[in-house]
Amino acid sequence: MTFPSIRRLRTADCPAFKQLRLESLLNHPDAYQTSWEEESQKSDAWFDARIRQNVIFGAFTPEARLIGLCCYTRPQKLKSAHKAIVWGMYVAPDYRGNGVSLQLLNHTISHARTRAHILLLSVTSSNLAAYRLYQKAGFCQYGQEPDAMKLGDIYYSERLMFLPLR
């Protein structure tokens, strides 16, 4: 497999971003704090604003198909602006197991390193593949939030992780 190219999403990528983001929420409802039901009702303008207001890197095939996302934001408040927070990571099923996730994550870390002091994320405790990916990239667990999310009648805990950037 040819590794994809990684670049920051632009507003022209909005339709592909919306499609892949909704796919991620539909396929893995236990991995995200938001739901497909909530985000599928959002307008194209809302998704466009997500691209403009966050840092979203996409992995693209040589044919320019968006196959992966890694999203982060920085708080706007002065006292917490030194942090960056990963809020979305996803790679299409056909492209998993080939290093795309790590490539996306490393690209995001490199970008955040020049802008933030620490990178934070949370991962559902049952998502061991993602947890191992974050560990491989250097993230350390600093806590766990019990019952962080409820999906139907099931509660999910989340591991809280950090990566010092400087």
Image (cartoon, rainbow, N blue to C red):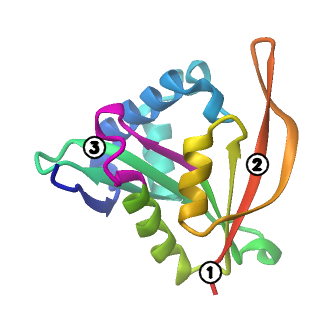
Residue at x-position 35% and y-position 36%: 92
- Identify the mark nearer the N-term, 1 or 3: 3
On the rendered structure, is 66 left or right of 69?
A: left
Q: Circle 1: is it few (<14), some (14-19), or many (20+) Cα within 10 Å?
A: some
What amino acid is at disc 3?
Leu
**Is 89 above or below relative to 93?**
below
The mark found on residue 66 in the picture is 3
On the rendered structure, is 132 left or right of 62?
A: right
**Is 155 above or below relative to 20?**
above
> Disc 2 designates what residue?
159
**Residue range highlighted in magenta:** 87-101
Give percent across and percent down for residue 13. 29, 46
The mark closer to the camera, 1 or 3, is 1
Q: Nearer the viewer, residue 141 or 63?
A: 141
Quadrant containing the C terminus in the rendered view: bottom right
- The picture quadrant where one finds residue 8 is bottom left
The mark closer to the camera, 2 or 3, is 2
Magenta stretch encompasses residue 90: yes
Residue at x-position 42% and y-position 48%: 69
The mark found on residue 165 in the picture is 1
What amino acid is at disc 2?
Arg
Tag 1 secondary structure = loop
- Identify the mark nearer the N-term, 2 or 1: 2
Magenta stretch encompasses residue 146: no
Q: Circle 2: is it few (<14), some (14-19), or many (20+) Cα within 10 Å?
A: many
Q: Residue furthest left?
A: 63
Tag 2 secondary structure = strand
Q: Residue furthest bottom?
A: 166
Q: Circle 3: is it few (<14), some (14-19), or many (20+) Cα within 10 Å?
A: many
- Identify the mark nearer the N-term, 2 or 3: 3
What amino acid is at disc 1?
Leu
Marks 2 and 3, how far apart at CA: 28 Å
